[in-house]
Amino acid sequence: MKKILFIIFALLLVPSVVLAAFNDVTVSGSADILLPGNGLTYTLTNATRVESFTVNTNDIAFVMQDSSIVEIRSTNRSKLTPSAGCEVLASTCTDSLSTIAMQCSSSITLTITPGAANSCTGGSGGGSGSGVSPGSGGGGGSSTTQTPDTTTVEVTLNVNDPFALSLTSASHTVVVTSASDAIALLTISSKPLRMSLNKNETKDIDTDGNGWTDLRVTYYGLSTSSLKPQFKFVELTSADSMAVSDLEPEQGPLGCSLQVGKAFKRSQSSAVYYVTKDCKKRSFNNSRVFFTYFDSWNDVNVVSRESLDALDEDNLGFMPWGSKYDPKYGALVKIVSDPKVYLLLGTEKYWITDEAVFNTLGYKWNWIEDIDESLLDKYTVGTEINYTDRHPNFTLIKYLDDSRVYRLEGGLKRHITDEQAFKNLGYRWDRIVTVEDSEEYPDGEELSS
């Protein structure tokens, strides 16, 4: 892997360089690209999987196939403009970074043209999270007092009349279902939360389910003039909020202001962060990776800038594939905190004990995928791979001058007769090991669709 990345870096210093070291170019860590036209450096992230790419004077051209992905990061905040024909998975522009992630569904040449430094504006994360402006919505008359980090809204509402409550870091809909001078019943949603308040009672509530209170609600009783219920809503800062329940031991440091294992963003920014076990924030730079941790963009909690800034950046720089990811049969994986490389076969993980074994068995370093520890834990421990005279059972192999693909099983090789059978078995075309003719196995029963 180190050798490959060194070659990439050296070549990219020259205009109009074509890189096609393998049939499928995969960036295992990251690769820096110096664009001759503007003299700025751009980074291909480890999510990139393309057939080849060419660095021209003012743009980068990628040869894409079905499901190819390219992701570019610019610490210079350049605007990254793609050519037509591929899906934009994510496009972000933050105070310190711009990124674009593209995925294609057919064979096409995708060109990405970077602009000048600090030329990006706005950005979108591919899902929910549009910016909201503090203020008041429908219902009765209201007054709003705003500071940079908190919003207070005092309002008189109509029963069963939805009221749009806009705060600095979130937006909610409030519906009063019944009210007397002594008590009011109301529902607060984004995520529905039903509550009861006695007159002059105040409650701090967790509206986004992140484990910390973020909104203070006070009921003042009925207005003496209109007999309508009167409320005060105060957005809580991280200094004011309290944990709704005690953290479990696995949830990380008790001093962490945001819940470990959850996704967060701030209003009017598309950047989404994951809070790690050691209470650091790690950004999602790829929407495909996000959905291996969460089911929906609605799982992203909107918090204040202060809350996010309180957490240090994790120095890893990327998110590994999460527990919902399906690496499929024959994948090579590792976790970011341990250099051990495992071969995944069926429901078992096989540790490849050293580099010499790995190379001799014909595996490729750019096949290795970083995954979350929770995903690796789903696999039971198989035998160690510390031998080089054979390949493990259930490995997919082919011979150098033969297009036929076999599955090893019980010391036999079983021919997979057609593409549909291969797909039905859940295998990956990019994880077939080419073996020497001298590595012989008797023929077993064919596998067909």
Image (cartoon, rainbow, N blue to C red):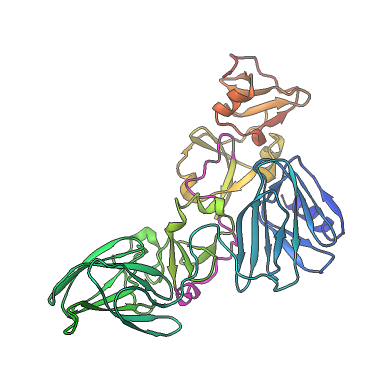
Count of labels shown?
0
* Residue 413 is a magenta residue: no
Q: Is residue 160 left or right of residue 331?
A: left
Visible residue check, residue 240: yes
**Please, which residue is most extreme toward the right here?**
15
On-image quarter of the C terminus: top right
Q: Quadrant of residue 140?
A: bottom left
Q: Is residue 274 left or right of residue 368?
A: left
**Please, which residue is most extreme toward the front here?**
226
Q: Is residue 225 left or right of residue 356?
A: left
Residue 246 drawn at (x, y percent): 29, 65
* Residue 313 is a magenta residue: yes
Q: Main secondary structure of the magenta part?
A: loop
Magenta part of the protein: which range?
304-331
Residue 258 drawn at (x, y percent): 41, 68
Q: Is residue 297 left or right of residue 43?
A: left
| Viewer-proximal residue among 261 and 166 | 166
| Viewer-proximal residue among 229 and 238 | 229
Residue 341 drawn at (x, y percent): 59, 44
Q: Height in image: 355 above or below 117? A: above
| Viewer-proximal residue among 445 and 291 | 291
Give the residue at x 81% y 69%: 38
Give the residue at x 38% y 58%: 250
| Viewer-proximal residue among 146 and 320 | 146
Residue 152 drawn at (x, y percent): 35, 81
Give the residue at x 63% y 45%: 368
Visible residue check, residue 390: no
Q: Quadrant of residue 151?
A: bottom left
